Image: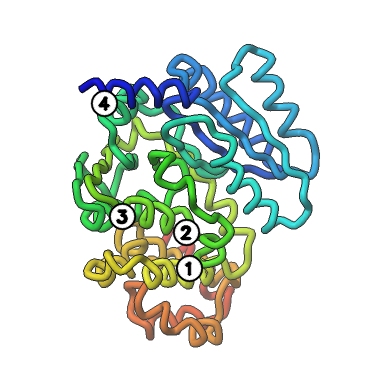
Amino acid sequence: MIVKSLIIIQKCVMSKYKIAMGILTANRSKHIKEDLNAIAAETYKRNIGIYIYDGSTDIKTEKVVSEFIDKGYHHVHYFHNNEHDDKKNFRDRASSLLSEMDAEYIWICGDKFTILPVNYEKILFYVDKDYDIITIYSKPINRTQCFSDPVLFLNYAIVPLTHWGSTIIRKELINNFNFIDIMSKCPSFWHVYMYAKAIEKQNFLGIVLFVNEKKLQLKARYHTRSRTLSHMWYSWIENWYKLIEILPRRYSRIKPNLYNRIDKDVHFFCLQELFRQRAENQFDFRKCLEYKQYISKVILLPNLLVYFISAIPTEIAGMIYKYIVL
């Protein structure tokens, strides 16, 4: 009992915060201002730290953050990385998460994927209960569920884990991870791969918190990205497939369940979405053939239907998409 008390005291002395949010950003000062407007006061009350890692090529984001710090929100910490290589810059910012965040648990977010005020008391309750990982979501999850088996946890929680800002994890579990190595293996879903490796432990304790969709404000701005980057969906298909393929051996028995989960649970490659992407010239027949092995595993729609959509003129795809939406 005395030893356990000493460990708890040592943790409190070593860490400034029980939980700290790490937000990776670059040239999106408007997003950061929106996020801080929403979370600064509530996190300050509960002593939840906010660490912002900025790769901007200007000082707009720094000015925004400075305004909040000047208002007395000293739990907000700012770090600027001015490298011009975007990929290296992002890796450096991600690596800085662990070296700078002074907390027992870290909450990795992105400026496009930030969960706004949720029930922080509920999260802190499970942190105090020494859970290793906590993830928050609404649908397709329909109930809160606890797990003592990391395999069953991942099988239930893999889709929520893909959303930046949805997951809090014990920092010591990922302290020794090589971010550059992880990102090179699975660029789009590196954080999910990291979580999967981190929770391979004895006496595992994880929870998926169901939060009513009206109460859970997931500020996911991904749609602004998918409409501007050509062939975005190929990257997602390929990297999702690679994620499942490289999961540690312990998860082998659930791999067949995971390939199409991103489509099955959130309808990411539904008929409407594919027509929209074809209308925007985001994929074509040759690409479909090239990515055949991924399509057949990841997308639920029949291959022939996907190939057909990829081959029709963009104007016709646009007309069909508008008809479906209406």
Q: Which residue is mark 4?
A: 4
Mark 1 / mark 4, whichever is N-terminal: 4
Q: Which residue is mark 1?
A: 239
Looking at this view, name the residue that lies furthest to the front.
Answer: 3
Mark 2 / mark 4, whichever is N-terminal: 4
Give x and y (percent) for residue 272: 42, 64
Q: Which residue is mark 3?
A: 200
Check the image and tell me how it is coloured: rainbow
Q: Nearer the viewer, residue 60 or 266?
A: 60
- CA separation in Å, label 4 and label 3: 23 Å
Helix, strand or loop status at disc 1: helix
Can residue 247 be seen here?
A: yes
- CA separation in Å, label 1 and label 3: 22 Å
- CA separation in Å, label 1 and label 2: 7 Å
Helix, strand or loop status at disc 4: helix
Q: Nearer the viewer, residue 303 or 240?
A: 240
User: Disc 1 residue type?
Assistant: Asn
Disc 1 crowd, CA 10 A, few/some/many (<14, 14-19, 20+): some
**Is label 2 in contact with label 4 (beta carbons under 8 Å)?**
no
Residue sitting at x 78%, y 53%: 84
Q: Nearer the viewer, residue 225 or 19?
A: 19
Residue sitting at x 37%, y 34%: 216
Give x and y (percent) for residue 207: 26, 41
Helix, strand or loop status at disc 2: loop
In front: mark 1 or mark 4?
Answer: 4
User: Disc 3 residue type?
Assistant: Glu
